[in-house]
Image: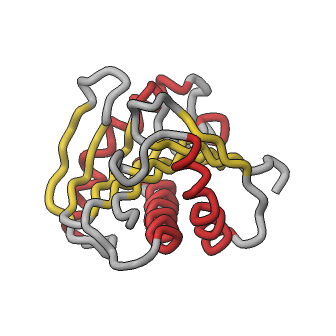
Amino acid sequence: MIQHVNVKIFADPSRAQGAPRQGVVVSEQVLAAAPAVFQRWIRESVVEELLIDVADYRHVPAGPGVVLVGHEANYSLDNGASRLGLLYNRKAPIEAGAAENIAQALRAALAACRRLEEEPEFEGKLRFGRDIEIIINDRALAPNTDDAFASLEPAIESALQAVYGAVEFHLERLGAARERLRIAVHAPREQ
């Protein structure tokens, strides 16, 4: 059963208003403000999961950024591959099917993105786009192969419909066989 689902929703620097258009500059400004924002999230219990601590990895180039560590899940402003985004990492199992677990991760990530966009520290600097990546964090259950991708595709499509409605998406398997199964989710821009 697919349990450990990660969802990354990428920031879109072109949608930030009043901020420099260079993605690197915007990423640095956002990451610099993230520890204080995440500490406030812990104090105010802004998400359903129990939040514990903040880990600052800004010193790692193209790395994990700033991580909000929780008991059931981690949230992070992740800068992996030098591409800023909100990464939701579900750690604790949920007794549901693959589609429900993927939908839960999508909903949690989207809610965190909306909240981050509304934080005063990120006003005009952080906007999330339509680019999404779903990562299955279990190589034994879901190796990064065409067969595993094909078997999970209906569950991913079902989760996307549950969260977004009748929007059409194109799914694409990413990465090499030795990596975790990663699926890029592309939606038409005009929707």
Residue 127 can be seen in this image: no
Q: Residue furthest front?
A: 147
Q: Is residue 49 left or right of residue 178?
A: left
Q: Is residue 70 above or below residue 147?
A: below
Residue 4 position within the rendered picture, expressed as x and y whole percent measured from the top left: 34, 58
Q: Residue at x 27, y 30 (%)?
A: 58
Quadrant into which the C terminus falls: bottom right
Residue placed most toward the observer, 191 or 90: 90
Q: Residue furthest left?
A: 52
Quadrant into which the N terminus falls: bottom left
Residue 122 position within the rendered picture, expressed as x and y whole percent measured from the top left: 45, 47
Q: Is residue 13 left or right of residue 30?
A: right
Residue 147 can be seen in this image: yes
Q: Is residue 44 above or below residue 121?
A: below
Identify the image quadrant of residue 74.
bottom left
Q: Is residue 93 left or right of residue 156?
A: left
Q: Residue furthest right?
A: 190
Residue 89 position within the rendered picture, expressed as x and y whole percent measured from the top left: 34, 54
Identify the image quadrant of residue 163.
bottom right
Residue 125 position within the rendered picture, expressed as x and y whole percent measured from the top left: 52, 41
Q: Residue at x 53, y 46 (%)?
A: 133
Q: Residue furthest bottom?
A: 95
Residue placed most toward the observer, 162 or 127: 162
Q: How many marks?
A: 0
Identify the image quadrant of residue 48.
bottom left
Q: Residue at x 58, y 65 (%)?
A: 155
